């Protein structure tokens, strides 16, 4: 009975339970933590273009260019979100707006991965959007309410993957004219 093999087996089973318990502990101690921080989103400049669209039925679509400021407010860092169960954050800035054809449009304009142990500063000035802000029609021109929000996915070491919206957003009207930069 008391062979090397059965000892190894029970040792293995025991370590496995210990590891499972630790993983669960890592998850449960952080599962209900609030991972919101206040965010300050500001738009300094918007420019609209009307460009050829080869994907849709329409011939020309609206394309927006946004310059923005973004910071964790007022601390300028995402440090409070990090703890021992956060491997990385996936930040993304999205624009939401309503058009005649869709009651909700969502476009991701910019994103960033922040690794644990890396520089967690969030204090951007005059940053240009990283992805094209395309509308599938002419819904951007003279739109009265375009809302920009910063959200983040928390990628944990163990457990669920929560999606958090930063508290703080900005809403702004878009220009009435193409090719004329508008400052805010
Ligand atoms: C703009 O849209 C956002 C949501 O997309 C809404 O919360 C806000 O009240 C709207 N603002 C105005 C002035 O309509």
Image: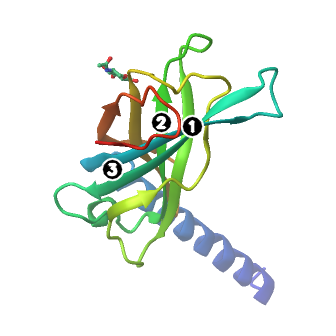
* Mark pair 2, 1: CA separation: 5 Å
Instruction: Judge whether 31 appears above or below 17 on screen.
Output: above
In this view, the residue in front, 5 or 37, is 37
- Residue 114 in the image: state x and y as whole percent: 46, 67
At label 1, counting other C-alpha atoms closer than 10 Å, the crowd grade (few under 14, some 14-19, many 20 or more) is: some
Instruction: Judge whether 50 appears above or below 166 on screen.
Output: above
Q: Quadrant of the N terminus?
A: bottom right
Check disc 1 and report its element: helix, strand or loop. strand
* Mark pair 2, 3: CA separation: 21 Å
In this view, the residue in front, 161 or 79, is 79
Q: Quadrant of the C terminus?
A: top left
Q: Is mark 2 within 8 Å of ligand 1?
A: no
Ranked by sequence position, the earlier of labels 3 and 1 is 3
Residue lying at the far left of the rendered structure: 74
Mark number, residue 95: 2
According to the image, label 3 marks what residue? 35
Ranked by sequence position, the earlier of labels 2 and 1 is 2
According to the image, label 1 marks what residue? 107
Residue lying at the far top of the rendered structure: 100
Whether pointer 2 and pointer 1 mark residues with C-beta atoms closer than 8 Å, the reply is yes
- Residue 151 in the image: state x and y as whole percent: 43, 45
Q: Is mark 1 within 8 Å of ligand 1?
A: no
* Mark pair 3, 1: CA separation: 23 Å
């Amino acid at each position: 009975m008391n062979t090397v093999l059965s000892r190894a087996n029970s040792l293995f089973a025991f370590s496995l339970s210990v590891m499972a318990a630790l993983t669960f502990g890592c998850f449960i101690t952080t599962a209900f933590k609030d991972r919101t921080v206040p965010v300050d989103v500001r738009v300094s400049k918007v420019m609209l273009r009307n460009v050829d669209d080869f994907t849709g039925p329409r011939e020309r679509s609206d394309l927006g260019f946004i310059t923005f400021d973004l910071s964790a407010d007022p601390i300028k860092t995402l440090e409070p979100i990090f703890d021992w169960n956060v491997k990385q954050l996936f930040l993304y800035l999205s624009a939401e707006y309503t058009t005649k054809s869709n009651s909700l449009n969502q476009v991701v304009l910019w994103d960033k991965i922040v690794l644990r142990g890396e520089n967690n500063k969030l204090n951007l000035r005059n940053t240009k959007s990283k992805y094209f802000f395309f509308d599938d029609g002419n819904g951007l021109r003279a739109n009265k309410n375009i809302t920009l929000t910063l959200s983040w996915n928390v990628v944990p070491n163990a457990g669920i993957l929560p999606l958090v919206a930063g508290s703080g957003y900005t809403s702004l009207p878009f220009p009435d004219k193409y090719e004329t930069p508008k400052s805010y």
